[in-house]
Image: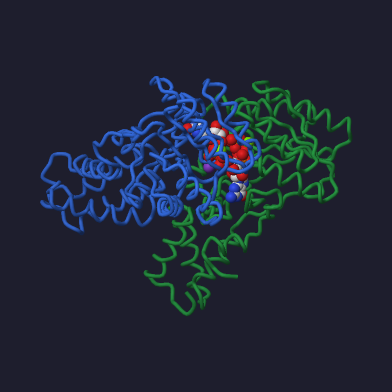
Chain colours: A blue, B green
């Protein structure tokens, strides 16, 4: 399955040898191959449609057939276009100049928020900072215990407050952080559906109180077509600063990276590559273009 | 789609609906081929409803046994990280309890932080006994103890939680095989159900997940969770077609009562956006 896109493309182009320029008509198979591959990677259907149109334009303008290896030339255009779409060469950056800076993690149920709160805390601790974790998920059974245990593991304090009301916990955590000179406060929130009005309002409230420097949505790498709906809604309600893609240590192709970037124009900042607290990496687009294409 | 004929435009629209529901390219192609053939034979007033009927017909269906004669009836729950295993176990516990069964939970996720506490909290809420060891201990030993407890206390149903694991981690898949082997040491024909819990938002990776879990320990059914959102869980249809694993349960929320017995027609209607 892995080299299938290259094989298919080279087949599509072999039949074109000697035909001179690329045309709308003779590029059809190659474009379809790319389209199928992106759909198999779970890139959103509508995003794929737009994308292949753009690739078609680029390829037609570039006289790909002149080159000795038109299939590779074509795939290069596709890759470059994908990388561009994922943010090109821009360096993943967090805006954490305020002191203390607030980072708020949000997302659907089970996406990896709590785990990534701990991973981020560890990441900052390694940089010599003094993070505070805030357990603001009062819904999921033992969510607070989960964060407390992770905090213990990485030796980062966890603020749990009254364990009952997320808004109160967050407010008290703010006082606590100022008093104890923490420089980064990481808020874990409960998982919620983007269509759950009350729960979305709770996030808006937490945002209002803390004015976070970074609101990051944690998204599961295995998510399918619906990713755009939840990402769009979280972004509409909260103006996200970016995303963390979790569970990329599996074999999901990760088309979600393309989809959510395209519909929100917000960057992916980190990727999660395992269950352990060290399994966090910065996001570099070039690494994911081939994976998404299935190369 | 009522009153429309099955032309290229309609086919493309249907394809879009199915792909957007995560049914996947291959499975969509297959089912639309079947639709075209069928349409030739029996002209339909509404291609969408015909498609629905064909999908329903093709779904392999085998409902969960709610009144098992095996005692204890052993259910092993598996899946990748964060799909809803532990919550589904709580829901199943409530369901069997309401059928008058005496249920016990086994806290077989000894790995994730507070996974044991999570199941214990559910046990407390539902008044269901939880057999647990300490964090980091051997999951198979927990299952072993839970089964012996169930036998000695004359329990009806044992539901075993396991840690979320990606199918790509072969050591963790081996651990799962070991859990199954140990279960069979106590009760040779158990587990009587091995349920794969699949997150309803999952895309095409779901197929590989199901394939690998099936190869490792066999699967008797699928529970799709989180269908209370806007995702349609179409990957379960593709899995069902390709691997013949029946879909048995649908999760529609975070509470213990948010569980539905799989209904093929309801599922396909929701998947295709057909109002009932
Ligand atoms: N393999 C892998 N597993 C991960 C990763 N990140 C998180 N997980 C696992 O995914 C599952 C869910 O993670 P949580 O951090 O509890 O997710 P959450 O978003 O806080 O969940 P809720 O609070 O219930 O909404 C756990 O089993 C984690 O160990 C990752 O990058 N890779
Ligand atoms: N909306 C919704 N949320 C669900 C459903 N089922 C489970 N959840 C939520 O999804 C999150 C993960 O559920 P868990 O039961 O902890 O998942 P798990 O598979 O046991 O996770 P790990 O043990 O970490 O692999 C929790 O926040 C649950 O409340 C469902 O049907 N609908
Ligand atoms: K998930
Ligand atoms: Mg959490
Ligand atoms: Mg669990």
Indicate the position of residue A79 as horizontal and vertical percent values. 26, 41
x 39%, y 52%: residue? A44
User: Quarter of the picture for ligand 2?
Assistant: top right
Q: Quadrant of the C terminus of chain B?
A: bottom right
- How many numbered badges does the structure rendering display? 0
Image quarter of residue A144: top right
Image quarter of residue A158: top right
Relative placement, left or right, of B90 versus B264 is right
Indicate the position of residue B14 as horizontal and vertical percent values. 44, 65
Q: Is residue A103 above or below residue A85?
A: above
Relative placement, left or right, of A136 versus A95 is right
Q: Nearer the viewer, residue A247 or A162?
A: A162
Q: Is residue B273 visible?
A: yes
Q: Is residue A58 above or below residue B171?
A: below
Relative placement, left or right, of B93 versus A193 is right
Indicate the position of residue B9 as horizontal and vertical percent values. 37, 70
x 55%, y 66%: residue? B52
Q: Is residue A10 above or below residue A160?
A: below
Q: Is residue B215 visible?
A: no
Indicate the position of residue B116 as horizontal and vertical percent values. 68, 30
Q: Nearer the viewer, residue B258 or A222?
A: B258
x 25%, y 56%: residue? A53
Q: Nearer the viewer, residue A1 or B106?
A: B106
């Amino acid at each position: 399955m892995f080299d299938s896109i290259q094989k298919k493309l080279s087949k599509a182009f072999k039949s074109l040898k000697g035909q001179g320029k690329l045309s709308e008509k003779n590029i059809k198979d190659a474009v379809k191959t790319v389209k199928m591959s992106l759909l198999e990677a779970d890139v959103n259907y509508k995003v794929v449609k737009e994308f292949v149109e753009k690739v078609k334009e680029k390829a037609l303008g570039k006289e790909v057939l002149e080159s000795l290896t038109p299939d590779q030339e074509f795939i290069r255009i596709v890759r470059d276009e994908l990388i561009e779409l994922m943010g090109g060469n821009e360096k993943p950056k967090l805006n954490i100049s305020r002191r203390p800076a607030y980072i708020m993690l949000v997302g659907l149920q089970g996406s990896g928020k709590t785990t990534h709160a701990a991973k981020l805390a560890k990441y900052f601790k390694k940089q010599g900072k003094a993070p505070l974790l805030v357990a603001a998920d009062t819904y999921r059974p033992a969510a607070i215990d989960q964060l407390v245990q992770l905090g213990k593991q990485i030796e980062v304090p966890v603020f749990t407050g009254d364990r009952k009301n997320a808004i109160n916990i967050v407010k008290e955590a703010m006082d606590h952080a100022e008093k104890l000179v923490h420089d980064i406060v990481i808020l874990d929130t409960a998982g919620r559906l983007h269509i759950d009005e009350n729960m979305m309002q709770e996030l808006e409230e937490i945002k209002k109180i803390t004015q976070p420097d970074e609101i990051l949505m944690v998204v599961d790498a295995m998510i399918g077509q619906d990713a755009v709906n939840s990402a769009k809604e979280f972004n509409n309600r909260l103006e996200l600063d970016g995303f963390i893609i979790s569970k990329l240590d599996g074999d999901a192709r990760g088309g979600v990276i393309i989809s959510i970037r395209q519909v929100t124009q917000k960057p992916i900042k980190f990727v999660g590559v395992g269950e352990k607290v060290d399994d966090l990496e910065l996001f570099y687009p070039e690494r994911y273009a081939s994976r998404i294409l299935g190369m | 789609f009522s009153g429309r004929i099955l032309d290229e435009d309609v086919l493309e629209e249907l394809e879009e609906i199915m792909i957007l529901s995560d049914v996947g390219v291959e499975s969509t192609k297959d089912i639309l081929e079947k639709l075209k053939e069928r349409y030739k034979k029996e002209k339909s007033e509404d291609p969408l409803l015909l498609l629905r009927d064909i999908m329903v017909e093709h779904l392999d269906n085998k409902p969960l046994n709610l009144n098992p004669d095996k005692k204890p009836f052993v259910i092993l729950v598996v899946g990748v990280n964060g799909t809803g295993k532990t919550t589904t176990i709580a829901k199943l516990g409530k369901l069997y309890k309401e059928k008058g069964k005496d249920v016990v939970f086994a806290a077989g996720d000894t790995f994730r932080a507070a996974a044991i506490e999570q199941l214990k909290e559910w046990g407390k809420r539902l008044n269901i006994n939880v057999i647990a060891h300490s964090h980091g201990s051997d999951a198979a030993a927990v299952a072993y103890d839970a089964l012996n407890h169930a036998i000695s206390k004359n329990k009806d149903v044992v539901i075993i939680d396991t840690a979320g694991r990606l199918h790509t981690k072969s050591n963790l898949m081996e651990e799962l095989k070991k859990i199954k082997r140990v279960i069979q040491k106590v009760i040779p024909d158990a587990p009587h159900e091995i349920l794969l819990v699949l997150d309803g938002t999952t895309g095409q990776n779901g197929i590989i997940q199901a394939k690998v879990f099936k190869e490792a320990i066999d699967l008797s059914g699928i529970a799709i969770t989180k269908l209370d959102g806007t995702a349609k869980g179409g990957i379960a249809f593709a899995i069902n077609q390709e691997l013949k694993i029946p879909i048995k349960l649908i999760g529609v929320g975070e509470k213990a009562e948010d569980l539905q017995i799989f209904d093929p027609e309801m599922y396909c209607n929701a998947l295709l956006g057909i109002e009932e």
